Amino acid sequence: MKCLKNTLKWLLIGLFGLTVLLYVFDLDYLIKAVRTIYARGYTTAYLEDYKVFDNRVIEAGEGQSWALHQDYNTVEATETLQDFHNQSQSVAFMIIKNDSIWHETYFEGFDQNSKSNSFSMAKSIVSALLGKAIMDGYINSLDQKVSDFYPQFGDGLGPNMTVGDLSSMSSGLNWDEAYYSPLSITTRSYFDDNLEKVILGLRVVDEPGQSFKYLSGSTELLAMVISKATSKTLSSYLSESFWKPMGAENEAFWQLDSEEQGLEKAYCCIGSNARDFARFGKLYKQHGQWNGIQLLDSSFVAKSVTPRFPDSPEYGFGWWLANHLNKDIFYMRGHLGQLVIVIPEDDLIIVRLGRTITKNDVTIDPHSPDFYTIIEEVYKMIP
């Protein structure tokens, strides 16, 4: 018994000492990381982690139900697609044809109202909010300087950085896009309770607006600019600009860095469902129009789904771009394989939410092999 007491005493002393060291070296965010992610058996953020973080509500208004196609769920997924769902742990899969749900399947106890983490699909939504802020007159244009809102970026190369550079991933910021390293700034931003301080500590180290480099910090800074320009929280601006006008059927959650007056983790982390995420695909497919109302300027939408840089045809302003089966495609994409794929030529929207996806070597192809498989198998299903 005495040995057990001594062991427990030294264990507590060790834990106390470790905690002190984490605070001394400004690594105390790891305590939150252990509590919310690592101690639960995960090595990275997971699909339902919105439940263990603080959130701000994205309010819904009068819901507009999706129409069901006359052939709704009359065709089963191909064997290859079923294998993909099983192996990658899909939780939702939808095919929307001519603005009607043609196929819809849920897995692992999920249904049409179940929320899951958007991860980086939120970047496309933040970019839409930028377009709305320009349309509303809060921001002058894509060329307005970030330093107009945050003078902290008024030195060196900082004054050259525009809001358009943030949206198109060409900010030049010194950000490390590493999801699995506990010491990366990406991990810190996910768990730190003062995200604004983290972002304002960044510096512009490369000439902005010259080339594509995917950095989550760019989107977070863009969201901070939008919130400052509008004097509104990102969640409330999203609610009034899109969530309510597009008839989202469920309220959503946006994760915060801390409770009450916290800052939205804007580069990720909207908790919603497949049907409501799909509305953004429809909005962009319809050139920013919804039920006869122009929610987003059509020229902004066109620019968003066009490559900014010839050397990086895979990205526009907040949206991923591809050509497959000789069809031009734009899509929202999030960590672990969250996808809203839009193929305008065939009036087609494909939504997939799930726990894993095959990783791609971005030096060879910016798109996951599963992205191609999903599209190919869907075309085998539809008449």
Image: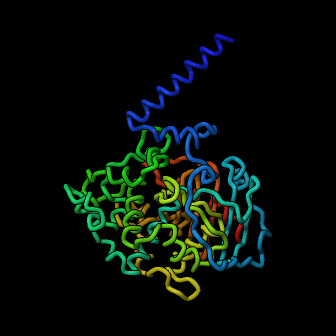
Q: Position of residue 227 (x, y in %)?
A: 41, 67
Farthest residue to the right: give it. 74
Q: Position of residue 290 (x, y in %)?
A: 56, 83
When asked about the image quadrant of residue 249, the answer is bottom right
Q: Position of residue 234 (x, y in %)?
A: 47, 67
The answer to whether residue 79 of the structure is visible from this angle is no
| Between 135 and 23, the one nearer to me in the picture | 23
Q: In the figure, 301 relative to 264: above or below? A: below
Q: How is the image coloured?
A: rainbow
Query: Where the C terminus falls, by quadrant?
Result: bottom right
Q: Is residue 107 left or right of residue 169?
A: right
The answer to whether residue 140 of the structure is visible from this angle is yes
Give me the residue at 40% from left, 80% from top.
135
Farthest residue to the top: give it. 2
Farthest residue to the bottom: give it. 292
Q: Is residue 25 left or right of residue 261?
A: left
The number of numbered discs placed on residues in the rendered structure image is 0
Q: Is residue 108 left or right of residue 124?
A: right
| Between 201 and 75, the one nearer to me in the picture | 201
Q: In the figure, 214 relative to 283: above or below? A: above
Give me the residue at 48% from left, 48% from top.
190
When asked about the image quadrant of residue 27, the answer is top left
Give me the residue at 26% from left, 64% from top.
147
Q: Position of residue 178 (x, y in %)?
A: 44, 44
Give me the residue at 69% from left, 12% from top.
1
